[in-house]
Image (spheres, rainbow, N blue to C red):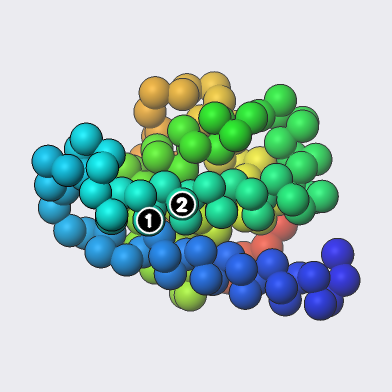
């Protein structure tokens, strides 16, 4: 990936993350639950943009292919990360989004969410948060 495309990806990820973070801690309304509120529509659009960004990146495509992961797997992983406590900012990263937007963290998350699609282990959540908190790079164990 060229330096320019890396910067463009970072800018897009930051922009999407800001949209995902808007009112993330607000209580849900009945309209939210029925999926017909403007807030939910904005969140769904931001999630689609995140998944488009992931699927357009060649290194992330390789990780997805290695796990035979689909967009549905990405959506489930994002949902589990947010519900598990990754829906917040750490060192400039909206963790739930950034965890899917880099090859090392995407691989780590998919290894755990595909194996157990209904829940995510607190150790996985803690490790992902720690990864961004400490500015790590490379594979996660």
Residue 52: image location, x then y, percent: 64, 49
Residue 98: image location, x then y, percent: 55, 58
Whether residue 126 is visible to the viewer of this picture, yes or no, is no
How many numbered badges does the structure rendering display? 2
5 to 56, vertically: above or below: below
Residue 103: image location, x then y, percent: 70, 50
Few, some or many C-alpha atoms within 10 Å of disc 2 (few <14, some 14-19, many ≥20)? some
Q: Are marks 2 and 1 in contact (CB under 8 Å)?
A: yes
For residue 45, which numbered disc appears in the image? 2
Where residue 79 sits, quadrant-wise, is top left
Few, some or many C-alpha atoms within 10 Å of disc 1 (few <14, some 14-19, many ≥20)? some
Q: Nearer the viewer, residue 121 or 1?
A: 1
Residue 34: image location, x then y, percent: 22, 35
34 to 134, vertically: above or below: above
Q: Nearer the viewer, residue 129 or 15?
A: 15
Where residue 42 sits, quadrant-wise, is bottom left
Q: Is residue 41 left or right of residue 35?
A: right
| Image quarter hosting the N terminus | bottom right
Secondary structure at numbered mark 1: helix
Q: Nearer the viewer, residue 125 or 2?
A: 2
Query: Residue at the spot x=48%, y=75% of the render?
Result: 92
Query: Residue at the spot x=47%, y=74% of the render?
Result: 91
Q: Is residue 23 left or right of residue 55?
A: left
Q: CA distance from mark 2 to mark 1?
A: 5 Å
| Image quarter hosting the C terminus | top right
Q: Which residue is mark 1?
A: 42
For residue 114, which numbered disc appears in the image? none
Query: Residue at the spot x=66%, y=29% of the render?
Result: 69
């Amino acid at each position: 990936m060229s330096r320019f495309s890396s910067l463009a990806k970072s800018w897009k990820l930051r922009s999407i993350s800001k949209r995902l973070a808007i009112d993330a801690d607000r209580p849900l309304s009945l309209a939210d639950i029925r999926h017909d509120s403007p807030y939910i529509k904005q969140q769904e659009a931001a999630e689609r943009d995140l998944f488009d960004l992931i699927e357009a990146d060649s290194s992330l495509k390789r990780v997805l292919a290695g796990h035979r992961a689909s967009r549905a797997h990405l959506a489930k992983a994002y949902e589990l990360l947010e519900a598990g406590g990754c829906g917040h900012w750490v060192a400039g990263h909206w963790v739930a989004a950034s965890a899917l937007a880099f090859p090392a963290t995407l691989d780590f998350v998919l290894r755990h969410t595909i194996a157990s699609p209904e829940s995510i282990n607190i150790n996985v959540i803690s490790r992902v948060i720690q990864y961004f908190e400490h500015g790590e790079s490379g594979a996660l164990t």
